[in-house]
Image: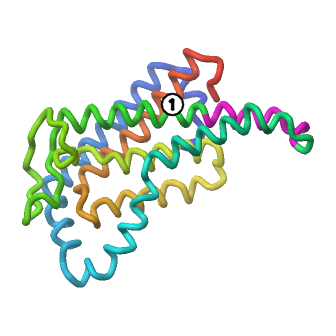
Amino acid sequence: MPVQQFGELLSDPKKLIRHILKVTLIALALAGLALVFVDQQASLYFAEQEVKGLIRAPARILTDIALSEYYFVGSLLVWIFCKWIGPRLSFLQTHLDRVDYYRRWALNFFVALLVAGAITHIIKFTVGRQRPHKTPDFDPYVFDHFTTHWHWHSFSSGHSQVIFTVATMLSVAFPRFKWFWIPFAMLICLTRVVVHDHFVSDIIFGACVGYVGTLLALQLMRKKTSNGIY
C-alpha cells in the first residue's frame, strides 16, 4: 500500500488493525533476527578505527536531523501560518483550500509526533535496554526494566521513530517525493548505529513505531476531530 494513500485504510478499522499488526509483527521478527545475528557485529564493525575515522563525524552531524524539537516547532509554524497568515495573503486567495489542507496536515503532524513519541517512551521505559556504547564489547543482551535513565533507553530508537514519523507525513503531503523521504529516513536511522547510540534492532522497531504511531494519530484526528486529513 503506497504510504500516502491512507484514506481507504483509515476508513476501515478492521483493515487498519490488520495492517498495524502485520507491520508490527514483521518489525518484531526483523528486530529479533537483528538481535541475534547483527546487533553486536554491526556495532563492532562501526567501532573499527578505519571505519570510525571515516564516517563517525558526518554521522554525528546527520543524526541530529532526527531531533524531535525541529519538527514540533516546524509543524506549529506551518499551522500558525496556514491558520492566521496564509488566508490573509492576496496571492493565496485562489488556493485557500490548499492552505486549509496544510493547516490540518500540520496539526496532524504535531499529533503524530506526540502519539508516536509517547509509544516510544513507554517502550523504552518498559524494556530498559542498555545502549551499545555502555559496554566495551557492545553486549546487546543487557536490560534493566522500568528505569528512567537514558543509558537504558536503547530500545526502541527515538530518533528513528521521529524521522519515520516525518517521512510518513511528508509522503502524505508530498507523495511525488516519497521515493526520497523513506530512503533518507533509513539513512538517518543508520547513523544511530554508527554513533553507537543504538543497535540495528532498535532502529528497526523505532521506524515501525514512527510509522504505526502516525497511522494511529491520523485515525484519532479523523474520528475525534474536524481536522482530519482523510
Q: Toward which corner of the image does residue 103 lie, by quadrant?
A: top right
> Which amino acid type is shown beneath numbered disc 1?
Val
Residue 39 placed where, x, y %? 18, 59
Q: Toward which corner of the image does residue 121 lie, by quadrant?
A: top left
**Rendered residue at 11%/35% (across/down):** 145
For this rendering, which residue is in front, 52 or 167? Answer: 52
Considering only vertical position in the picture, is 2 above or below 18? below
Q: Which residue is mark 1?
A: 111
Considering only vertical position in the picture, is 210 above or below 54? above
Residue 214 placed where, x, y %? 47, 35
| Left or right: 152 as drawn, with respect to 100 | left
Residue at the limit of the structure toward the bottom, as seen here: 50
User: Which residues fall within the magenta stretch?
Assistant: 92-106
Q: Is residue 37 on the magenta stretch? A: no
The crowding category of the residue bearing disc 1, from other C-alpha atoms within 10 Å (few below 14, some 14 to 19, many at least 20), is: many
Q: Secondary structure at mark 1?
A: helix
| Left or right: 81 as drawn, with respect to 95 | left
Q: Is residue 101 on the magenta stretch? A: yes
| Left or right: 194 as drawn, with respect to 63 | left
Considering only vertical position in the picture, is 210 above or below 183? above
- Work out which quarter of the rendered image holds the C terminus and state it: top right
**Rendered residue at 60%/29% (across/down):** 7
Residue 50 placed where, x, y %? 24, 84
